[in-house]
Image (cartoon, rainbow, N blue to C red):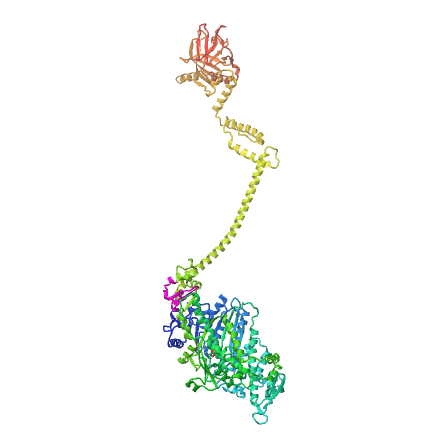
Amino acid sequence: MTSSTTLPNMETGLHERDRAGVQDFVLLENYQSEDAFIDNLRKRFQENLIYTYIGQVLVSVNPYKQLPIYSDAHIKEYRNKHFYEMPPHVFAVTDNAFRSLIEENRGQCVLISGESGSGKTEASKKVLQYIAACSGHQTTVEGVKDKLLKSNPVLEAFGNAKTNRNDNSSRFGKYMDIQFDFKGAPIGGNILNYLLEKSRVVAQMGGERNFHIFYQLLAGADDKLLQELRLERSLDSYNYLTDGLNGSVSSINDADYFKQVQQALAVIDFTAEEQREIFGIVASILHLGNIGFKSQDETSEGNAQVNSRDLVVTVARLLGVNASELEAALTHRTIDARGDVVTTPLNVELANYARDALAKAVYDRLFSWLVQRLNISLQAKEARGSRNHVMGILDIYGFEIFKTNNFEQFCINYCNEKLQQLFIELTLKSEQDEYRREGIEWIPVEYFDNKVICQLIEEKHKGIISILDEECLRPGEPTDRTFLEKLTQQLAEHHHYVCHEKAPIQVQKVMGRNEFRLVHYAGEVTYNVNGFLDKNNDLLFRDLKETLSKAGNQLVRACFPEQELRSKKRPETAITQFKSSLNNLMDILMCKEPSYIRCIKPNDLQSAGVFDDQLVLHQVKYLGLMENLRVRRAGFAYRRSYELFLQRYKCLSKNTWPNYKGSGGAKMGVQHLVRDLGYDNEQYKLGETKLFIRWPRTLFDTEDAYQAKKHDIAAIIQANWKGLLQRRKYLKLRAQVIVLQSYCRRRLAQQAAKQRREAADKIRAFIKGFITRNDAPNGYNDEFIANAKRMWLLRLAKELPSKVLDKSWPPAPGHCQEASTYLHRLHRLHLARIYRIQLTPQRKRQFELKVLAEKVFKNKKNNYASSIPAWFQDDRIPKEHIQRINDFVASNFGSEQLKYQSACTKFDRHGYKSRERFILLSNKAVYVLDGKSYKQKHRLPLDKIDFTMTNHNDDLMVIRIPLELKKDKGDLILIIPHIIEFSTYIIDTVGTADIVSIVDRDSLEHNVVKGKGGVIDIQTGAEPGVVRDKSGHLVVIAGQ
Ligand SMILES: Nc1ncnc2c1ncn2[C@@H]1O[C@H](COP(=O)(O)OP(=O)(O)O)[C@@H](O)[C@H]1O
Ligand SMILES: [Mg+2]
């Protein structure tokens, strides 16, 4: 996960943490030992590891060479990483602050401290670089970022100079606020400047230079501009540049920088006019430096006179003031003493002082104007960001101890005392306060509180500043010496004040009589009081102010406002101004969350690779790093609110992953977590709201475990994410399907509804049709009726009787009655027809005979009914006789056809004796044959005879024979077994029923030969039979 392969020169990778020394001093075994501390710094320095932590404080050692650790790739690496995840770096500190700002809405400040040349300004630029790189890229933001970044070259050109310690030493203090919107994009900025070292304008120490801009202008301006400014491209021509270092410095390309400054000015929207005026002022200072004075009367006390009027004219032209007025102002002084305005000429010394004061004032005010102008340009266009969304960067001169220390060093060191105080307040004190607040057992760590020194300097009425101011304002003849005397008088007893008189002998040896010594927290500094009063008064004669307030150069006019002249109030002294601006700064910083960058300079040679143990040790001491470390170590290296700790490391225990659900909130969760992580009691303490971890090692181990675990979590997250994607896909698909489905369902539902509606319509029509089914067709019942007819026909088709005898007929609805009757008839005819067609000729004959029988006998003879069931047969001869009968027919019938034959019984006319006979019917006659001999007894032609029978249930048949058939003597009385059958055949053969007569009487007469007759009585009885009764009658007993 780390970048060890991609980014060289970084101790990336968790395993590499302790590659050279320790990344965090808290890890030092021997943390009390300064040697061990320096050792660690050196080891790391030699490996080009210039950054080391003390807890959250970053210690930075100036490498004096470019290290490849500030690329965009590095910035990316540090972006949004956990503070301890990556090796120490200014980017890590910035990222931490930046995230607190954005995420927790807490105002931030990055406090960069250290000696001159220790790398403060470079560090502040890295902070800015990081912020610019990791904030948004909208064009509006780009503009702001550009301006923020470009403000640096401008400020450095005017405020930095080459000193013996630093080729690019900031000669002013700078506090820069960057304002962000809620998303973390910079939208504006504001710069506060502190105490420009303006004495440098007129004089520099050996080996040092004036402010860069002078050299840059001379080297970089084109000839036209130089000509306009009346300048020559020669450094030696200008007195103000010749004090310290003559000429250019190889390591500084002034010409290039000038181009950069011009570019930067353009980016920050300086108009051409403004630029012209700025350079006019810079040039005017150079010319001013060359103005010399000579005494009018050759004595040093004589009135001063300008020795080159041309120069005055040039300066006047550049500043846009009247040359004569300027000349007068440079050589005269007007004092307004309670209304008495007195103008006195100046001697040469005072004139020189006045000239230098003018040059310093003009330059100083130009610088302040530049800052104000930058601020206008950097002002947030809209106040979108809340007030809290501000990150301050403080890059202020470090502690200075020179051979001779002046008013400037006093101010600078005072400033550092104040900052140290702030550091103590915010770090050492607040840390211990936190333990108290959190209820953690704790043995207080002793540290030196420099409050006492601050008091020594700034206490009202008693402090050095008060005494100095008092001395400046005192009437009479105050001098630097009288000031020193006052100091000694009042402060001799103070532990941190050393005066010549009371100093031990050794000290007296190195201390001048015009010096005093302060025991600063960072070391002892001996100050020379020379110039203290002058510098504090910061006197610019009224005449010069007046002249400048009327300047044609707008910029100059703005710097010297007329109101200032009119104000009767004495202007504040320099030190008091400085004090109040410092207090103001403290107020600003106190309400912000601080991040510290402590810069250390490894050597005085400005060379790479050299590590001067003594020099470093000194800085370590006065920066209070050892104390810082002691507090860190004695206490707990790391603390984290329970919520944050749990949030980050909860994946390391089953009890807390994915979320702690138990009781007791985050605190209990953390308790579970640390128990599962195997922390022992020594290693941690539970505060009210925070977990305190004693050793960074513990946290590093935890962090390492977390890093390792990350992969698992990544897999889980990945799985969840993939799951989520699939689910989204699925949900989308489902939604689509549902849409389709709903369309389909709608369609189907519409169809179903339509069907239902149609069905309902049908049913309704049907019901209405049903209700009115019997009415005449009326629109409703048409269909019903038609349907009823159809249905009836269909039903009828299935239910038609299939037998001709079946007379049943399905019922029909009213409307079909007529048709039904008709159809019934038709159907019957149809059945009959089929029946008929199917009949065989035999059956047909049978039916004809049966029909004939019915016609003749129905209701006329009682045994007709019993004849119906059996089919008629034309042969009733028993089998044993059939041959003989056939023989008879063959030999006797000739062309006659046999119609019927049967056995029968004949009763004699006399005596009624019964005889067995056969009777045969042909188409012409009836033959009676003897029952035994088969001989013909009678042949009775049909056209001659007729037949008589009774209506009773008997088989009696009397054949009436006419008399002419003599041969047959009288009627023939026969009992014929199938009498109906026999009679029917006869009628059929004859073709008329007249031949048979049925008598409705109980007795019957028959003829015997020659007119004689007999009587046959008919009786009914249970046992049918034929008997002869006593009276000689034949009695036939018929069935009942
Ligand atoms: N991180 C760094 N990398 C490389 N060179 C540096 C670094 N910090 C400082 N320097 C060098 O040291 C010089 C002095 O640094 P600077 O920031 O101006 O010091 P200060 O502001 O503390 O006086 C710079 O001009 C630069 O050459
Ligand atoms: Mg600096």
Instruction: State the image coordinates of residue 1011 (x, y, percent, origin top left).
Output: 50, 6
Instruction: State the image coordinates of residue 836 (x, y, percent, origin top left).
Output: 51, 26
Q: Which quadrant of the view contains residue 384?
A: bottom right
Instruction: State the image coordinates of residue 379 (x, y, percent, origin top left).
Output: 56, 72
Does residue 788 appear left or right of residue 66 in this picture?
Answer: right
Q: From this view, report whether residue 80 is shown above or below residue 403.
A: above
Look at 42% across and 11% down and name the residue there. Answer: 915
Whether residue 541 can be seen here: yes
Q: How many marks?
A: 0
Residue 599 part of the magenta-drawn span? no
Q: From this view, report whether residue 566 is shown above or below residue 106.
A: below
Q: Which residues are magenta?
A: 674-703
Quarter placement of the N terminus: bottom left
Pick whichever, 748 or 424, lies toward us.
Answer: 424
Pick whichever, 167 or 968, lies toward us.
Answer: 167
Q: From this view, report whether residue 983 is shown above or below residue 164.
A: above
Pick whichever, 688 or 850, lies toward us.
Answer: 688
